[in-house]
Image (tube, rainbow, N blue to C red):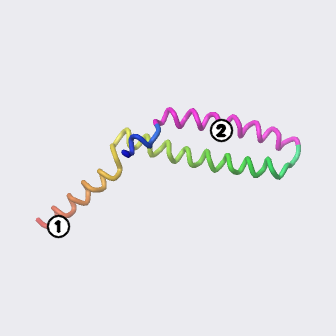
Amino acid sequence: MTLEAVMRTPEEIRVEIEELTAKRAELLTRLARGHDALLAIEHKEIEEQIAELWDEHRAARAQQRWGDRDLIIKRARAEERLERAA
């Protein structure tokens, strides 16, 4: 399976971020009414999911702009070997 088949587009990721952000806002409103341990745990989980999605979003944008990370690293290492051999 290729990375392109696994990695979602930045737009798809952004939609999911927006959905979770709306859910987070709702949870914060409910938490403002009074502390609830279960809601606090759910809020923490959503915060972590949003952070992971932003990481995925950055990676997807970088891949769109510069290409596959592994290929770039392979090419750079090959160039380093050639420079050392010269």
Determine whether, in the image, residue 76 is placed left or right of residue 69. Answer: left
Determine whether, in the image, residue 83 is placed left or right of residue 5. Answer: left
Amino acid type assigned to the residue bearing label 2 in the image:
Leu
Q: Crowdedness of circle 1 by 10 Å Cα count: few (<14), some, many (20+)?
A: few
Magenta-drawn stretch, dominant element (helix, strand or loop): helix
The picture places residue 85, in percent across and down from the top left corner, at 13, 67
The picture places residue 76, in percent across and down from the top left corner, at 26, 56
Image quarter where the C terminus lies is bottom left
Which residue is located at x 71 percent, y 40 percent? 24
The label shown at residue 20 is 2
Judging depth in this view, the residue of 20 and 1 nearest the camera is 1
Give the magenta range.
Answer: 9-33
Is 56 within the magenta? no
Which residue is located at x 44 percent, y 43 percent? 6
Callout 1 secondary element: helix
Of callouts 1 and 2, the N-terminal one:
2
Amino acid type assigned to the residue bearing label 1 in the image:
Arg
